[in-house]
């Protein structure tokens, strides 16, 4: 109820009418140019053929730019010389004053039709309007039902309805009662006209509700974008609104709307959710929190948190029953926790860290970043959670993984963490030196390729080859990592030199991705030789031939310090491949790359190979014992001895070969030693 002792509000007024055209006749205030233009249009006749009753019709609309609202009454002016002339008396109300009103009665009583002659000074003064108390009124219930349903069920559309030509006053009572029922923020934007001859929206303002004298079919043709309020349906959620219109003193709804409507957007769209909130919180015992949360979610459809006071009320009720509320309510509670007084609810909030993560990792993350009491609770929970629990929460929230991993770096060595698609590769740069080996295996098992070069440049070669050849590693990813490894010459050498390469197929893969001279060998045995001695496993003929050709090319270059051993590994297989002509053209080019051109009579690849390899052993004084064991094919061994014996230097080298074989006492190569003796006689 309004206090009768409250002072009246003061409203400005204008009078528009005919004066050589429809014009402003008198005003109690200077109008802004934009407001003046809107009022000039809205004060004119509401459409062609409109014939107002003797009491006229009402138009209400906002002046948004100046923060005011206009309520106007328009009468016919048959005394004017031009047909269709009207008088319009407009009351201009400050929005702050409009919020104080609980009844439109004082405004309606302030209207005054000009007499002839016009007394202009009457319209040049502001008018005091008393704040009338709202009282129970006799309204046409069916009419109110139809308008309420249309206005709030089709909240984004203009509503049009057939005017009651027999009782226009009844229409005014219903429309102004609906207007006054609205909370102030909605009331100051609500536009209406109780007699429209055409759609008046688009004239500088938008009218939510328009009444016209045509029947439904004609109305829809004149108002093509409007919804016709025919009263055939009624949403149950609006029943409290109807009760409040007729018996406002018995309802708590209007006060609820007034208190909550100030912090909601959405205009008429907010009415249904607010009615549901009122019912679920104030008309249900105990409160129906699920319905309340659903209504709040409807209000928040545009992404902005609204109805903060109600949100706090729902959150406090949910805190009281945190162990029993439904999932949707719990999610709402977690979303609202930062607004709860941490001192008042310290014990309960301290237990919610784990619940926060399980129900909403994103809110958990926000709490971590924001700090405060809830942030501390989240931090403690994060410290105590198992990695698997954390990963489960990150699976659908990979974009927060970086911040979580900063606080739990042990996640970076878990395969299931890296299997989350949204976890960025860049996190690999945060892996500690201590964990880099385990992380390499986790990344490979997860099929991650992006961090390969970063990890390869940092990881211990022993850990790297262990990860690359692990049964857990994704085969496709392992291939990509090997390609990245081969772009790092020193690390490739280190990996091969570990002596821990278990699979000969790994050696072949690295060879196919490398140049024969790329891997450095500044000291010690050639990394390629070390890996050959350690690795095992099956290879198909194609891979065997390629590896032999590759190692032959390396042995004949300048990089390797194990030329003799590499030649021993590759010579026989390359020779047989030349004989059988089984090399592909690409592998044959590799195998012949560093062979001597040969003389006039040395034109085939087998001869070139014998000449080149023999020359390398003789000229570079490579291990004579290895030359003597270069092949286990007797006839091929004899051809190598014949090749060496062609020169004096070669014959001297053969003497060293014979001595090496004799000293070794190897029976398998006795025939070779004996042939050398005969050759040198």
Image (cartoon, rainbow, N blue to C red):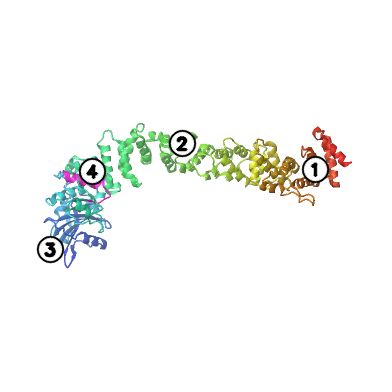
Mark nearer the viewer, 4 or 2? 2
* Between marks 1 and 3 in the image, the one whose residue lies nearer the viewer: 1
Secondary structure under badge 1? helix
The residue stretch that appears in magenta: 141-159
| Residue 315 visible from this viewpoint | yes
In this rendering, position of residue 123 left or right of residue 445: left
Residue displayed at 20% across by 51% down? 217
Residue named by callout 3: 119
In whole angstroms, how far apart are the C-alphas of marks 4 and 1?
Answer: 110 Å
On the image, numbered disc 2 is attached to which residue?
A: 392
Residue lying at the far right of the rendered structure: 681
Q: Residues within 10 Å of mark 4 (few under 14, many from 20)?
A: some
User: CA separation, marks 3 and 2?
Assistant: 80 Å
Which residue is denoted by mark 1 in the rendering?
Answer: 640
Residue identifier under label 4: 255
Cα–Cα span, label 2 and label 1: 67 Å
Nearer-N-terminus badge (2/1):
2
Camera-side residue: 535 or 410?
535
- The spot of residue 671 in percent (x, y) is 83, 35
Q: Nearer the viewer, residue 268 or 287?
A: 268
Under circle 2, the secondary element is helix
Asked whether 151 falls inside the magenta stretch, the response is yes
């Amino acid at each position: 109820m309004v206090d009768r002792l409250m002072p009246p509000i003061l409203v400005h007024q204008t009078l528009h009418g005919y004066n050589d055209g429809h014009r402003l006749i008198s005003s109690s205030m200077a109008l802004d140019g934009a407001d003046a233009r809107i009022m000039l249009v809205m004060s004119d006749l509401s459409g062609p053929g409109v014939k107002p009753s003797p009491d006229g019709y009402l138009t209400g609309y906002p002046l948004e730019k100046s923060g005011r609202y206009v309520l106007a009454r328009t009468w016919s002016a048959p005394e004017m010389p031009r047909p269709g002339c009207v008088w319009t008396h407009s009351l201009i109300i400050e929005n702050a004053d409009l919020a104080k009103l609980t009844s439109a009665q004082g405004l309606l009583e302030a209207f005054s039709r000009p007499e002839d002659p016009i007394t202009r000074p009457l319209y040049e003064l502001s008018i005091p309007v008393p704040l009338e108390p709202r009282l129970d009124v006799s309204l046409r219930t069916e009419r109110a039902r139809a308008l309420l349903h249309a206005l709030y069920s089709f909240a984004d559309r203009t509503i049009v309805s057939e005017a009651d030509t027999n009782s226009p006053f009844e229409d005014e009572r219903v429309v102004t009662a609906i207007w006054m029922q609205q909370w102030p923020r909605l009331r100051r934007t609500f536009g209406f006209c109780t007699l429209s001859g055409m759609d008046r929206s688009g004239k500088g303002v938008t009218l939510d509700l328009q009444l016209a004298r045509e029947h439904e079919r004609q109305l829809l043709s004149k108002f093509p974008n409007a919804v016709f309020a025919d009263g055939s349906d009624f949403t149950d959620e609006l029943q409290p609104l109807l009760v409040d219109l007729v018996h406002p003193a018995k309802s708590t709804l209007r006060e609820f709307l007034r208190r909550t409507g100030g912090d909601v957007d959405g205009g008429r769209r907010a009415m249904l959710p607010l009615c549901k909130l009122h019912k679920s919180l104030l008309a249900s015992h105990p409160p129906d929190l699920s319905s309340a949360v659903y209504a709040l979610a409807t209000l928040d459809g545009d992404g902005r948190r609204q109805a903060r006071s109600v949100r706090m009320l729902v959150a406090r009720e949910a805190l009281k029953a945190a162990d029993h509320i439904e999932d949707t309510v719990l999610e709402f509670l977690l979303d609202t926790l930062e607004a709860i007084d941490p001192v008042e609810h310290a014990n309960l909030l301290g237990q919610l860290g784990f619940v926060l993560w399980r129900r909403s990792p994103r809110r958990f993350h926000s709490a971590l970043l924001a700090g405060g009491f809830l942030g501390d609770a989240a931090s403690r929970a994060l410290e105590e959670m198992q990695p698997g629990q954390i990963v489960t929460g990150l699976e659908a929230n990979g974009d927060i993984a970086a911040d979580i991993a900063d606080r739990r770096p042990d996640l970076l060595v878990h395969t299931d963490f890296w299997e989350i698609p949204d976890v960025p590769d860049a996190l690999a740069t945060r892996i500690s030196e201590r964990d880099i080996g385990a992380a390499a295996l986790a990344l490979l098992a997860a099929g991650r390729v992006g961090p390969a070069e970063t990890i390869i440049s940092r990881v211990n070669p022993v850990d790297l080859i262990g990860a690359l050849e692990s049964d857990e590693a994704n085969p496709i990813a392992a291939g990509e990592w090997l390609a990245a490894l081969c772009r790092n010459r020193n690390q490739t050498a280190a990996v091969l030199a570990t002596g821990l390469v278990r699979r000969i197929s790994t050696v072949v893969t690295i060879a196919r991705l490398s140049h024969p001279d790329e891997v450095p060998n500044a000291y010690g045995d050639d990394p390629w030789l070390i890996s050959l001695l350690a690795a095992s496993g099956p290879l198909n003929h194609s891979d065997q031939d390629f590896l032999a050709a590759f190692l032959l090319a390396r042995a004949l270059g300048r990089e390797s310090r194990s030329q003799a051993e590499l030649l021993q590994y590759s010579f026989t297989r390359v020779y047989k491949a030349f004989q059988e002509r089984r090399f592909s053209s690409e592998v044959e080019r590799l195998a012949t790359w560093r062979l001597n051109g040969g003389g006039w009579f040395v034109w085939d690849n087998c001869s070139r190979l014998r000449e080149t390899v023999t020359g390398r052993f003789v000229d570079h004084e490579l291990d004579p014992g290895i030359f003597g064991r270069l092949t286990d094919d007797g006839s091929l061994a004899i051809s190598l001895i014949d090749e060496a014996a062609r020169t004096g230097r070669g014959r001297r080298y053969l003497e060293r070969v014979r001595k090496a074989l004799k000293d070794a006492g190897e029976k398998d190569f006795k025939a070779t030693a004996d042939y050398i003796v005969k050759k040198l006689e």
